[in-house]
Image (spheres, rainbow, N blue to C red):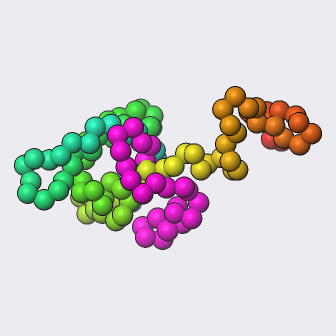
Amino acid sequence: MEQLVAELKKILPFKETTVSGDIVLVVAKKPQMLLYAAVGDIERDETRKEEWWHVTLHLLSIPMQSVTWTLRTSQFTGQEIFTMGGEGRFIKAVRFDDVRSGPSPSPGKEDKGRGGERKPGLRIVK
């Protein structure tokens, strides 16, 4: 699990924090899964002395599912690999503003390639 997480950290732009509305990557050893989830509510678990949170995740899978896991901050922010039912888990928010290469165009300006041509949003790959 540690090796997989290390590889993911090399190829994905992760955030250091996780807040409601973020998209997180969820990695699980068993059942084996690698999927995205939208973070819903994050509410303090008042029944515990230590800092634990009820984190609602809307799994972006088929079929879509919602789960609420009780986690520490370090667990839902990707600072540690943790276990549920004895199996490894990892959750960390993805930073989508870094997915696109290069700086974002200024508002109102078109994204232009060489020669002032507009770059297509999609391209055909053969």
Between 77 and 35, the one nearer to me in the picture: 77
Residue drawn at point x = 21 percent, y = 42 percent: 43
Residue drawn at point x = 49 percent, y = 55 percent: 14
Q: Residue furthest right?
A: 115
Q: Is residue 65 above or below residue 46?
A: above
Q: Quadrant of the N terminus?
A: bottom left
Could you tell me if residue 43 is visible in this image?
Answer: yes
Could you tell me if residue 87 is visible in this image?
Answer: no
Residue drawn at point x = 44 percent, y = 37 percent: 60
Which quadrant holds residue 124?
top right
Task: Determine if the magenta segment contains residue 16.
Answer: yes
Q: Residue furthest bottom?
A: 3
Residue 36 spot, x, y in % from top left: 46, 44
Residue 109 spot, x, y in % from top left: 73, 32
Between 39 and 34, the one nearer to me in the picture: 39
Residue drawn at point x = 76 percent, y = 36 percent: 111
Which quadrant holds residue 119?
top right
Residue 120 spot, x, y in % from top left: 79, 33
- 22 left or right of 126? left
Residue 45 spot, x, y in % from top left: 14, 47
Task: Determine if the magenta segment contains residue 93.
Answer: no
Magenta region: 1-25
- 49 left or right of 114? left
